Amino acid sequence: MNNFCLSTVLDCYALFEKMCAKIETRYVKKWVGNWIIATAIIHTLFAFIVFKDTWKTIISNGLFNTVGDDAKIAGVVFFFLWGFLFFAFGFTIKYLEKHNIPLPKVIGFGLLINAIIALIFVPESGFWLLLPPSIFILYGRNK
């Protein structure tokens, strides 16, 4: 990455950080964590069911260092890992909900931006499942 790109990324990050500092927090009802966990489970199952032939290749190659330069295998592995990451994120949200800890609105903002960008690239995907929790986190009421 050249200096211009690195500088641009750092500038964007600094701007995002300033925006996040100004965004207030809000309590959320207790369905968002469960929604994200359910989405993660569906995502992970989908990774195994739809890409079962790729998983057979991965397993037959011995798992270790099987991605290499194969873009399809890399995509399936990252798809699978995204499900696990989202699973942990869902449990984090669930913990915050359980203990009535304010959830930063930046989480809703991040989910919404992620969903919009992803839906532009892949409209026929499950990224629409991010819209309800992101909108609720941003605009929902705790009543």
Image (cartoon, grey):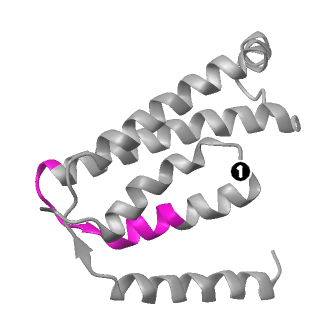
In the image, residue 6 above or below residue 88: below
Residue type of the residue flagged with mark 1: Pro
Which residue bears the numbered disc 1?
123
Location of residue 132 with respect to 74 vertically, above or below: below
**Looking at the rendering, in which quadrant would you find the N terminus?**
bottom right
Q: Quadrant of residue 13?
A: bottom right
Viewer-nearest residue: 91 or 116: 116
Task: Place residue 68 in its image quadrant.
Answer: top right
Judged from this view, the residue extending furthest toward the right is: 69
Residue 87 sits above or below residue 111 on the image: above
- At x 71%, y 50%, the residue is 123
Disc 1 is placed on an element classified as loop
Tell me, yes or no, whether the highlighted magenta stretch contains residue 27.
no
- In the shown orientation, is residue 120 left or right of residue 36? right
Q: Which residues are magenta?
A: 98-112
- Look at 88% across and 38% down and name the residue there: 69
Front one among 133 and 9: 133
Main secondary structure of the magenta stretch? helix
**Toward the viewer: 39 or 20?**
39
Q: Nearer the viewer, residue 83 or 3?
A: 83
